[in-house]
Amino acid sequence: MTGGRFAGRTAVVTGGASGFGRATVQRLARQGALVTIVDVAANGDEVADEISAGDGSVTFHFADVSRPEDIDAAFESAYDRLGRLDIAVNNAGVLGGGWIHEEGATEFLRRQLDVNVIGVWNGCRTALRLMRPSGGGVIINTASPAAQVPTPGAAAYGLCKSAVLHLTHSLAIGYAPDQVRVNAVLPGPALTGIFQLDPARRDALEQAYLPNIPLGRMADVDDIAAAIEYLASDEASFVTGAALNVDGGFRPRLPPRVLQ
Ligand SMILES: NC(=O)c1ccc[n+]([C@@H]2O[C@H](COP(=O)([O-])OP(=O)(O)OC[C@H]3O[C@@H](n4cnc5c(N)ncnc54)[C@H](O)[C@@H]3O)[C@@H](O)[C@H]2O)c1
């Protein structure tokens, strides 16, 4: 694609091989960005080829976001395509419940911190290093409504996503003078690969979520990708430090405690 709102721009999307990330890659590529998927997924090359075959130019770089050297190499490979990095979407994440009193809770927290917090930190750090000398850029971090409302038995995930919101706000203020905009999206529940569910459990999960979603449906991956596309675009040129809920009004109500 030669035209489009992102023609002549480069983008990285972590977690771009699946779910919200993949839908975002599709949208950015369709609008002319040269996109690099940054992921640990075994099928990353296939996803990049598939999207490129449709409309766009997408490459895959295998990288674990929790490793700063991986992020440096991946983001630099995107930068090298045009000698600039314009858009960084720090979206890779892992999910899980787990009560703090249970065996292994601290190890579980560390794993989530590694991917969901250090991974976003690494992405922001490398993006800022590459964007500042070029006169600016856009960073979008994927948080969650879990950052705003506690979910019983999922404190580790919620505290990670709260940290993502704080990091987003801090960097937005700190790097505005460099013309780097930093925003967060907070997606509502969507039945993506992150839940690792069989079909029966997917139905049960959907039924549990629906009463708490005023618009009456789960999120579609493209709902989130559309919001990320907007935040990445020049239409959002005066938007920084925003936490954009794309969740159908989702406000989790505290369920009765089921585990002791
Ligand atoms: N699905 C939801 O209901 C929901 C709601 C709110 C927020 N989120 C957040 O949205 C983001 C995307 O999740 P999704 O729902 O699209 O899930 P997904 O599992 O479909 O996609 C996540 C991608 O991240 C990749 N990934 C995981 N660990 C990685 C690592 N260490 N390094 C590089 N890549 C890694 C996976 O391989 C996968 O391709 C996550 O940050 C998640 O926390 C999801």
Image: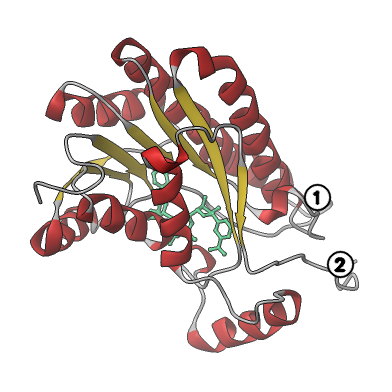
The residue at 33%/46% (across/down) is 39
Left or right: 202 with respect to 212? left
Is residue 183 depicted above or below 97 in this figure?
above
Numbered disc in front, either 1 or 2? 2
Left or right: 59 with respect to 42? left
The numbered mark at residue 100 is: 1
Residue 155 rendering spot, x and y as whole percentages:
76, 50
Q: Nearer the viewer, residue 44 or 21?
A: 21
The residue at 57%/42% (across/down) is 111
Is residue 133 depicted above or below 145 in this figure?
above
Q: Are marks 1 and 2 in contact (CB under 8 Å)?
A: no
Q: What amino acid is found at the position of numbered circle 1 in the picture? A: Ile
The residue at 51%/32% (across/down) is 238
Q: What amino acid is found at the position of numbered circle 2 in the picture? A: Leu
Rendered image quadrant of residue 50: bottom left
Q: Nearer the viewer, residue 163 or 157?
A: 163
Of the numbered discs 1 and 2, the one sitting upstream in the chain is: 1
From the image, which quarter does the C terminus lie in?
bottom right
According to the image, label 2 marks what residue?
254
The residues tagged by marks 1 and 2 sit, at their Cα atoms, a distance apart of 17 Å
The numbered mark at residue 172 is: none
Q: How is the image coloured?
A: secondary structure
Residue 167 rendering spot, x and y as whole percentages:
62, 29
Residue 162 rendering spot, x and y as whole percentages:
70, 40
Residue 117 rendering spot, x and y as whole percentages:
58, 35
| SS at mark 2 in the image | loop
The residue at 33%/58% (across/down) is 22
Left or right: 169 with respect to 181? right
